[in-house]
Image (cartoon, helix red, strand yellow):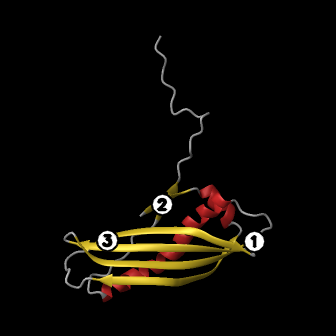
C-alpha cells in the first residue's frame, strides 16, 4: 500500500513528538464460514488527529478490512487504535501539519499491530493467514498556485 504525505509538514511536528501510548480501543470481526476459497482482501484506513490538550495529541486510526471469495464477502473487520503523542514546545502546531502528522505517524506506528491482528483473525476464521503488505510513503505533489502555470507552450513564429 502507498500513502502520499507532506514530509515537511510531518517533520515540523515529528521533531517535537514522542509516542506515549498505543491502545486497541475497538474491534469488530465476522466471517461467513460457508464461503471458501482464496480471499481477495481490501484494507482502508484513516488516521486523524483528535484532541490536543496539555501537549498531548490523540490520534485515532481506524482500519476497515474486507475480503471476498468468488464475489461473496467472506470476512469483515474494523480495528481502531488510539495513539497518544507528547508534543513539546510552546507554540500551537498548525492544524494542517497535525493532520499530516496523524495520517503518516498514526499509520506508521499502528500498522504492525493491525498486521498482527489481521493475521490472527483470518487464521482463526479458517482462512490462510493474511499478512498486510508493507506501507510505503511517497511525497505528496505540491499544489499549483495561479502564479505557476502548468507548462508554457512554444510560440510558433
Q: Position of residue 86 (x, y in %)?
A: 70, 75
Q: Which residue is mark 1?
A: 88
Dot 1: what SS?
loop
Q: Quadrant of the N terminus?
A: bottom left
Number of labels in the image equals 3
Q: Which residue is mark 3?
A: 41
Q: What residue is at 52 percent from the left and 84 percent from the top?
A: 25
Between disc 3 and disc 1, whose residue precedes? 3
Q: Which residue is mark 2?
A: 3
Label 2, label 1: how far apart the Cα atoms are: 26 Å
Q: What residue is at 59 percent from the left and 34 percent from the top?
A: 148
Between disc 2 and disc 3, whose residue precedes? 2
State the image quarter where residue 30 is shown.
bottom left
Label 3, label 1: how far apart the Cα atoms are: 39 Å
State the image quarter where residue 89 is shown.
bottom right
Residue lying furthest bottom: 124
Tell me if mark 2 has few (under 14), some (14-19) or many (20+) residues whose alpha carbon lies within 10 angstroms of its own: few
Are the residues flagged by discs 2 and 1 in contact, CB closer than 8 Å? no
Label 2, label 3: how far apart the Cα atoms are: 18 Å
Which numbered disc covers residue 146? none
Q: Is residue 7 above or below residue 44?
A: above
State the image quarter where residue 52 is shown.
bottom right
Q: Position of residue 111 (x, y in %)?
A: 48, 74
Q: Nearer the viewer, residue 99 or 153?
A: 99
Amino acid at each position: 500500500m502507498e500513502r502520499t504525505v507532506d514530509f515537511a509538514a510531518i517533520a515540523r511536528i515529528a521533531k517535537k513528538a514522542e509516542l506515549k501510548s498505543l491502545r486497541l480501543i475497538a474491534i469488530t470481526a465476522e466471517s461467513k464460514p460457508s464461503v471458501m476459497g482464496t480471499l481477495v482482501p481490501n484494507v482502508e484506513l484513516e488516521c486523524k488527529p483528535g484532541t490536543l490538550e496539555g501537549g498531548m495529541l490523540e490520534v485515532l486510526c481506524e482500519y476497515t478490512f474486507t475480503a471476498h471469495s468468488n464475489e461473496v464477502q467472506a470476512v469483515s473487520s474494523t480495528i481502531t487504535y488510539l495513539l497518544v503523542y507528547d508534543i513539546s514546545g510552546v507554540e500551537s502546531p498548525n492544524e494542517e501539519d497535525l493532520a499530516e502528522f496523524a495520517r503518516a505517524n498514526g499509520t506508521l506506528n499502528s500498522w504492525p499491530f493491525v498486521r498482527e491482528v489481521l493475521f490472527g483473525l483470518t487464521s482463526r476464521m479458517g482462512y490462510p493467514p493474511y499478512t498486510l503488505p508493507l506501507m510505503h510513503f511517497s511525497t505528496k505533489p505540491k499544489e499549483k498556485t495561479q502564479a505557476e502555470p502548468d507548462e508554457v507552450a512554444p510560440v510558433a513564429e
